Image: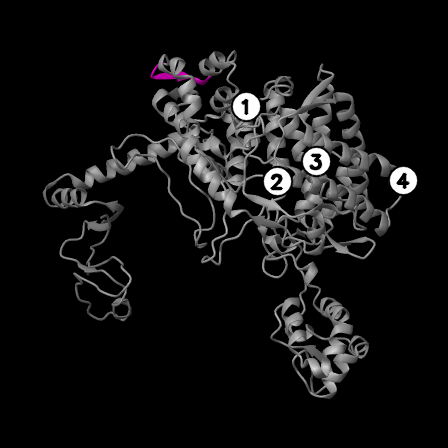
Amino acid sequence: MEANIVWSLGLQNSVHLLSSLQLPAFRKSLKIQNESDIKGEKGAYFVSKELKLSRNSDVKWKIIANVRQNHAQIISLSQTIQMDQHLEKSIEEDVEAGTQNLIRLNAASDGLQITADDLKDTRHFSNTLFNIMRGGIFDDNYHIEKSDFLQYLDSASKAVKERNSQYLGMLADKFSQAELMDNISSTHDVDFLRLCTEYLPLKFSRRHGDPSRPWNRFSINTQSETDGSKILDYQGNWRDIFQNWEALSHSYPAFIEGMIFKFVNASTFDGYNPYRVTKGGFDWETIEPDNPWSYIGYWGDHQVVYLLKFLEFAEKYHPGELNTFFEKEYFVYANIPYRIKPYADILNDPKNTIDFDSEADHHIRNLVIKKGADGALVGSKKDDIHHVNFMEKMLAMVLSKLSNFIPEGGIWMNTQRPEWNDANNALVGNGVSMVTLYYLKRFFNFFEKVVAQSHEENTLISEELVTFFNKIWQTLESNKHELSGRLDNTIRKVITDALGQAGSEYRHSIYHQGFSGIKAPVSYGNIADFISVTLKYLQHTIEANLRADGLYHAYNLMKMEENGIEVAHLSEMLEGQVAVISSGHLDCKLTLKLLDAMRSSALYREDQNSYLLYPNKALPKFLEKNNIPHTLVHSSSLLVQLVKENNIQIINKDIRGNYHFNGGFKNANDLKHALHTLNPDKYGLLVEKEKASIMQIFEKVFNHIAFTGRSGPFMLMKA
């Protein structure tokens, strides 16, 4: 048993309240009574005392709280409060020690700066502090403690630790990261090299998120509750960990390879990443039948921009180092029990595209218990762990994105999760991201240069991925003549279908047969040609997304037709402008032109000399919504008959003669259900004949497809 405790110091003979029950009386200056026990109420702690202060005098007091205290700790504190004459001084010294500790942690990530602007210095300090509280801070620069390193290896792979026990036994109690990397450079145990490189001695990290959400639990584990020993640990959502490591890498550049290894080896064969990354591996969301908050999916942008920032930094810090990874099979695939549906099913319902494989989930977790975190890695028919080279990991990621490429639209967001900006949650399914395409363009620019530096002729890739690569490449090559002008909806669908089907067939082969373990050669010349033709498509799509006002589209909508795909546009968003500038597509003149257009746009707030994420829209008021045009009503025999018979299950007519859908409908599913509940003898034939057209009328009235989420009606003023 443990308890949270609170006590005060400095006010003698005061009244103590353990609840909020007497606060109304206190506010009215009525007498309040001491509370020594409270039942059936939320706990609280208030101290009340009447004070008379003479001029230039003061009275100081303290309220001290602590959490998760056991019996021995509470009894000891109780005695200290009664007996220690220097208790207040001890508290102040402890607070000061904690403050200096925090400053040292922040200083280790270059969080201290001194300029003429105190506000900016404070902002930098707080930003750095929040950063290390998410991603962690290295415990002792580049030093590694043997005890923690051995615990990490045991948790990651018991077999790898056992195979290398002789070397591990000779390690000093503390050694440097440089020593470790130098010692393992000649090892033939690729899993030992992988795990050693991934080891990052971080501390002071906790998961990040909105505490109001019931699935978020927060804890900064710094000390063992058993023996008080130091704990090195980190955990966080994928985006938060790697986004914050991006900044941390500038303070500890020698760890950049470890960050890249951790990123790449926690990504999946189908080009995505799990939900959470931890020191002990990675984790994924599950479907919990009794938890309405549970949900699964893949964020579509995580794999491009965060990895790219690491790769760009690594190439600057260690020029040419990335090329040495291309042929080394140091890399693996995370085994996540999600099954992305076949392309035909995605077309049919792009909002429900992933199945959760409960049997696989159970099997993977049992392997982790038995083997360590490496039990959650993909195997092959030849080996428990399917090892691949760095080039394959890069291809798996970009091919995944291209299999969801809609020419002149962007990257289709069809994996049940949005991108980094969850204010655009509602775009999932019909949304198409130009933001990710802009960063993909930057990635290919970088990738092209790195590939050109390789002195190898071929690289060995899993044969299943080679087939996927060839299908994507062939599709792009065979249709590149269409890039001479704007595409029509039919050609757009032909290309999208071919790309999507290639991805679907690749996933299906691995889901059902697994990797064969056979590698096939791909020439660097073919990879260079693939990069070249892909860049042509990306450039064409960027140019097609230049708006009339000089800005660039951030997100689009895809509307599926029988023989085509229509691309519709949304309003301007700041992130689209940031991303297109980052893409490298614009030269200096075009960048300046865009910046001028931004200053003249609805995104700019002159009173703040800054920009909004989204324009301040003039939204329709309640009575301006849900009005069905008369022409649309009269185009439907069913709607006309329902109005005539005063049947308000679907539609009603107001006293002014205007028409409205049933006010209880939340979405199209409610309308669909209501159509099915109409009297079948009376309306059955009309429902069967006009169901599709009435659904289209509903969408025309509400335009639900264009609803982005909080960024629409609720976050208009967020800057």
Name the side, left or right, on which 103 lies relative to 251: left
Can residue 580 be seen here? no
Q: Amino acid at mark 4?
A: Ser
- Determine which of the numbered discs, if any, sits on residue 511 in the image: 2
Q: Secondary structure at mark 2?
A: helix
Residue at the spot 44% in from the left edge and 49% down from the top edge: 216
Q: Residues within 10 Å of mark 1 (few under 14, many from 20)?
A: some
Q: Report the mark closest to the observer, 2 or 4.
A: 2
Q: Amino acid at mark 3?
A: Leu
Query: Of marks 2 and 1, which one's residue comes earlier in the chain?
Result: 1
Quadrant of the rendered image containing residue 683 = bottom right
Region of the chain picked out in magenta, as a range? 172-177
Measured in 3D between alpha carbons, the distance from the residue under mark 2 to the one under mark 1, in whole angstroms, is 30 Å
Q: Secondary structure at mark 1?
A: helix
Q: Amino acid at mark 1?
A: Glu
Query: Of marks 3 and 2, which one's residue comes earlier in the chain?
Result: 3
Query: Of marks 2 and 4, which one's residue comes earlier in the chain?
Result: 4
Q: Which of 599/675 is in front?
A: 675
Q: Are marks 4 and 1 in contact (CB under 8 Å)?
A: no
Name the side, left or right, on which 64 lies relative to 307: left
Q: Position of residue 390 (x, y in %)?
A: 62, 25
Measured in 3D between alpha carbons, the distance from the residue under mark 3 to the one under mark 2, in whole angstroms, is 17 Å
